[in-house]
Amino acid sequence: MKHFINILLFIFCSISLRLSLNAQSMKSFFLIMRNTGEYTLWDGNKIRTFGFAENIVSHPLIPGPTIEVNEGDTVKIGAMNFSQGAPHTIHLHGLDVNQENDGVPHLSFAIEHMDTGYYTFIAKHAGNYLYHCHVSSTLHVQMGMYGKIIVKDKHNSKRAWTNGPEYNSEYAWMTSEFDTLWHSDSVLNMDIDHFDSTGHSEIPIPNYNPQYFLINGKSQNQLYDDDIKLQFKANESIYLRLFNIGFLYNEYVFPSILNAKLISSDGRPINNPEYIDTIIAFPGERFGVMLSGSEEDSGLIELRYRNMNTDSIINSQWIPYNIRYFASTTEKLIKTNYAYPNPSKGNININLGYQIEKSRLKEVFIFNIHGQRIFPQIHIDSNKIVIDLSNYKNGNYLIVVDNKSFISSIMR
Ligand SMILES: [Cu+2]
């Protein structure tokens, strides 16, 4: 009955809005909430997840589907809970919504198994927002129940907001972490339906020690995928949207050649934007950064995941960028392994199919499984690059040469 009234109210509201606004449109989305997700991590490990899926038969996406609308739109998000258990909600973080549509369970409504609910709001300000489930939110967010909301400018032009700064292309990075212990059967097979009247979980949750540090659900060599790796032409600009839904805080270190300029914060323009090289994003924060480069260059942006209490760096991920004058044909990531032998007992050879100049050996990047950059001995032997990892531990290493990435293992 409650939902029926919601729908009626919604229809009434949307009719009256259409009459008064007319020019802007209605955008509808439909998400499936699931507790039975499975997600494959960069190293092949599979974990259980909760999350938002595009349909009943597919696994939840990490992050969930992006809600992309234009300023002035009336937005309707429908969600069906197909989760065999726990209720869920959609909390619209940072948006001006009324309490009924806020998705905080005891103030708004929760969507039970096989039930459908609707959230509506007007996208008043172009900017970067996010959504997440607000039931037992620490656990449900950790499990994967989150996604981006992007409100573009009114005219759908390439501007950060209506009449705001222009850009040539855009990227959106949502950061989070996974602690696989939280995704284990021993935690999830407890009675996960219970939450007290304030929406807090009654489940004993383990200490948080994440092992996976994600950008758009990806890490390590996956950061070379097209949705993350920044690629642009010299004298063009990129609008980079940042969203942190993790429990650690993020510190981005931008090389000065990228001319990073912080232009928006939590969905609002910054009045006097300045060039900066470091951006800190606490959990729930969103930022808009304009990047531009006038020279050909390629390198890495360091993203540090820091502990909220101790400030210590728990992990670093390294995000590649590439500025070129012209589109290159040698751009492609070599997925077949040209690193050999693999696994190796110490020396790893990389044959790129062409000679790399000795002066560029300092641009060979090698990372351990924790994302820390390491500096082993490297030399060129005839056409191949030889990396001596004999002083390093057994395990996987990520090697990046000339914008191509290789994963190699050391086993002794
Ligand atoms: Cu939930």
Image (cartoon, grey):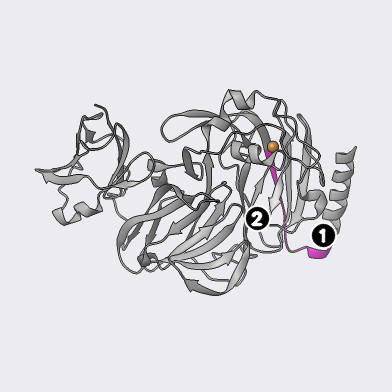
Give the image location of residue 40, x and y in percent. 48, 31
Farthest residue to the left: give it.
382
Looking at the image, in which quadrant does ligand 1 appear? top right
Q: Which three-letter amino acid code belongs to the residue tagged 2? A: Val
Q: Secondary structure at mark 1?
A: helix
Viewer-nearest residue: 208 or 279: 208
Residue carrying label 1: 17
Residue sitting at 56 percent across and 53 percent down? Answer: 243
Residue type beneath disc 1: Leu
Quarter of image, res 181: top right
Q: Do callouts 2 and 1 mark residues in contact (Cβ within 8 Å)?
A: no
- Residue 308, position as x, y percentages in the image: 55, 51
Nearest to N terminus: mark 2 or mark 1: 1
Q: Nearer the viewer, residue 250 or 133?
A: 250
Q: Residue at x 82, y 54 (%)?
A: 14
2, 318: nearer the viewer: 318
Residue 116 seen: yes
Q: Residue at x 41, y 33 (%)?
A: 43
Mark 2 Cα within 10 Å, few/some/many (few <14, many 20+)?
many
Quadrant location of the C terminus in the rendered image:
top left
Quadrant of residue 139 in the image?
Answer: top right
Q: Residues within 10 Å of mark 1 (few under 14, many from 20)?
A: some
- Residue 196 is marked as none
Write down the region rendered in magenta. Answer: 17-31
Does ligand 1 reach within 8 Å of label 1's beta carbon? no
Please name the residue that numbered disc 2 is placed on: 69
Q: Is residue 19 magenta?
A: yes
Q: Is residue 38 visible?
A: no
- Measured as percent of width and height from the top left, residue 299 is found at 32, 56
